[in-house]
Amino acid sequence: MTTLKVNGHDHQVDADADTPLLYVLRDDIKLNAAKFGCGLGQCGACTVIVDGKAVLSCVTPLLLLEGKQVTTLEGLGTIDAPAPIQRAFMDEQAAQCGYCIAGMMMRAQALLLRNSKPTDEQIRAELEPHLCRCGTHMRILRAVHRAARLMDTAELSTTTQGSAP
Amino acid sequence: MNGPNNAPGILDRRQVLAGGGALIVSFSLTDAFAQDQAAPAAAAHPPKWIGSLKDTPFLDSWVRIDADGSITVFTGKAELGQGFRTAFQQIAAEELDVPFKSLTVVTADTGRTANEGYTAGSHSMQDSGTAILNAAAQARALLVAEAARRLDVPAENLRTENGAVIAPDGQHLSYGDLVAGDMLHVQAQPQSKLKDPATYTVVGQPVPRVDIPAKVTGGAAYVQDMRLPGMVHARVVRPPSYGARLTDCDTSAVENMPGVVKVIRSGHFLAVAAKKEFQAIKAMRALAAAAKWQETAGLPKQEDIARVLLGLPSQDSTIFTRSNPSAVGQKTVEATYTRPYQSHGSIGPSCAVGHYVDDLTTVWTHTQGVYPDRQGIAEMLRVPPAKVRLIHVEGSGCYGHNGADDAAADAALIARELPGVPVRVQWMREQEHGWEPYGPAMVTKLKASLDDNGAITDWNFEVWSNTHSMRPGGAGTLLAAQHMAQPFAVPAPKPLPLPEGGGDRNAIPIYTFPNAHVVHHFIPAMPVRISAMRALGAYHNVFSIESFMDELALAAGADPVEFRLKHLDDRRGREVIEKAAQGFGWQKGRKAPQGRGFGFAFARYKNLAAYCAIATEVEINHETGRARLVRAVAAVDSGQVVNPDGLVNQVEGAIMQSMSWTLYEAVTFNDTRITSIDWQTYPILRFDAVPDSIEVHIINRPGQPFLGSGETGQGPAAASVANAIANAAGKRLRDLPLTRQRIKDAIDV
């Protein structure tokens, strides 16, 4: 048994130490957002945040995560109370099939946590590990810019929903 | 590209709802249509413009209203990320006069919806959207007629609003109060009383997509997210190459691995199911290591594929000819264009969940065609189609026939080995890349002459291609059925019929030339597994035609936009070209900044769907040869627009995806195996190559038929980028993809 802290809750996980975090999240903890895309760290669909940093969960084994804080898209907000980045992706209609989007959002969230006003170049560079096949890139970029503005506003009004747990 | 209509959807749905009992359908035409009722024979064959109602004419196959007032809209099409679930909901809300949010849309399910064949060919709006539009309008008329009867008020004095019929004196009957029994179980009439588009309040609005909130908050949105009670995880061990034979496999060690439930071996089909997902992956790896395969070196030379295609036997047909001997050219231009095999490259590898209970096999799948795929799976299982139910659940975007149908067949086959246990089959990355049926390689040869006035006098176009659909219908198209014991043979390929066509899709020019000759060389032999990929042959044919139009414009010393308009009679086409040129700031003789080029291209998809023109600016790094799309401006006319933001999203995506195909993508293989098996060996667009801007201008045509626009951008985007590269480099590249190496080689010559 390994204790894994996900979205602020402790989970007792009965999985081999070499199990990639992705399968622990999806199979053991029954979370949907982190997606299997390649299992090779090439596409970014599985991205989650570990201790504030974007991590490719498909190539990160469970044994490296003891005592760390894992945040998935589910941990940011809900349909009824979306986090700024979720609100921004809805407002910009930044999805077609949407399969890659959760991973994109988590890396963007990690960027915005350390740099609240990224430039367009910084956002593009940050999202370089991520693939989108539908070609929704322009909207994704707009959504990240919008999220930065929304988070700024949210901080001013001291409702810091969406920051790391 | 409709599939076989082998099972009337309504009967199927009724059978399921009634617990399998046979249904005797009685017609109950109501007073609403008593006066202007068409003859029954005509009603059974409504005109084509009412979309899929022609095949599934009962209104309640499309719209159901329950006594509690809840309204369900049914479509036989599958939401693939195009956003039409939202568009259909808008259409139904508009014609029924109910709030948008009060509706539920049920998509493709052999147990519940009409058989609308495949969700393909940009047909969803035109087939299903049109059916829903008319069914909703006719349902509303029936409700009004019933209210007229009950209130004893002439129907024309009644109005509808917010899910109710309202009389001049304020009396008010809700749809739920009015609906009774089989009121909507009537055949559609040939004519619907549609609303005036000028009064639309929901259609034409950028209503936010209904599926996006769940997708951005971690809701269960995909078949990959399904978790049925007691579900096990399966993985398939695919052969290492086409035609490889499993000669030996000691499965005993794998059977004893932790969590393993069963190893399935049937002929050359090998799979394993385990309790947990990563256990299944470990077991799959062990099984792959234990398997011994005999392979055959049967693949052609990848770098020589154009010559290989030209050397294969072909069935040749002249598909268009026009002759005017008085038009004689002075200057002749010739060119050959090639396209490699290209991958759909879905970000999420294919997945399906199968469940075999009480002799019924249910498969949840992201197939594009639940009915045809059911037919293939039933044949593979050697059971009647009624013993198989396919339910569409979204997957990762597919852009055509990817591994979806094969994964569904895998799930069905494995589920039969584990009665009562739900089985989730997830393909691995290398399986999707290595086994999906690719977009076919193609060759086109063009030759044309110009007269002294710079007008094209004759046009010759020849295209060599495989078919562009090996979709199911029969079991032999499914990998599991090909590999299992007592296998099914791959069916003989067929060219897809015109006017939509396959390899010859968009091969006939939309321009008017005095002499023209178009030949389709259909190649039956398929050395590499292929099938339908977004736009089919139109991607390469439009790339060829629109590249060649620029070559001719150059030879004629003409501006590319002006040159196109000079040869185009189609009014809507001309307006789209003018709109894109204007939005881009296109001016005759205007030069691009240093190191950059301007490009333009246009097509009407299939010569019968949406019009699209795209102007681009591309930057070339002369040191590396790297090309980057800087900006694109598109104009699109897809008839009556239902959701403008959805349309813009589709065209933006088409430009980005086509640009990726055009600049980077080719399936690679050696003499035995596919070697492009992940994102490193099959690179696609990444953020460093994303343009500065994409603008999409819509020309709305209120009241005109929906034209379908999911694929209209693929060809024009490719040619526009190629033309901009030619403009920047001063050299014409004709072999796809237009890689940095090819551009550099061209510049360096």
Image: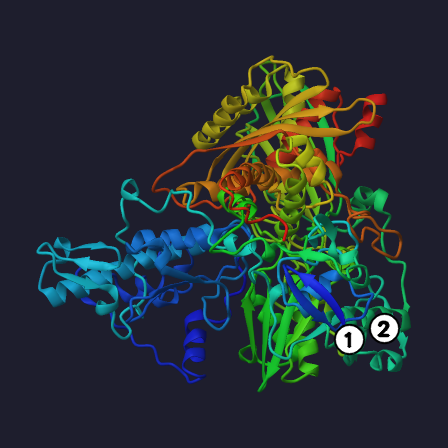
- Tag 2: Cα neighbours inside 10 Å, few (<14), some, or many (≥20)? many
Q: Is residue B173 left or right of residue A45?
A: left
Q: Secondary structure at mark 2?
A: helix
> In the picture provided, is B11 more to the left or to the right than B29?
right
- Which x, y percent locates residue B565? 51, 23
- Residue B14 against residue B598 in the figure, above or below: below
Evaluate whether residue B652 shows in this view: yes
Write the residue at 13% across / 67% down: B150
Q: Is residue B684 left or right of residue B497?
A: right
Q: Chain of mark 1?
A: B
- In space, the residues marked 2 and 1 are separated at their CA atoms by 8 Å
- Where is residue B8 drawn, in percent x and y? 45, 70
Rendered image coloring scheme? rainbow
Residue type indicated by callout 2: Leu
Up the image or down, B404 lies above or below A128; here it is below
Crowd class of label 1 (few under 14; some 14 to 19; many from 20; radius 10 Å) = many
Does residue B327 show up? no
Chain identifier of the residue bearing label 2 in the image: B
Point out which mark residue B155 bears: none
Q: Are marks 2 and 1 in contact (CB under 8 Å)?
A: yes
Residue on which disc 1 sits:
B272
Q: Which residue is mark 2?
A: B287
Residue B477 in the image: state x and y as whole percent.
68, 65
Task: From the viewer's perspective, tell me whether residue B629 is left or right of residue B322.
Answer: right
Counting labels gives 2
Quarter of the picture containing the N terminus of chain A is bottom right
**Amino acid under label 1?**
Val
Name the residue located 74 percent from the left edge and 19 percent from the top edge: B730
**Rendered image quadrant of residue B427:** bottom right
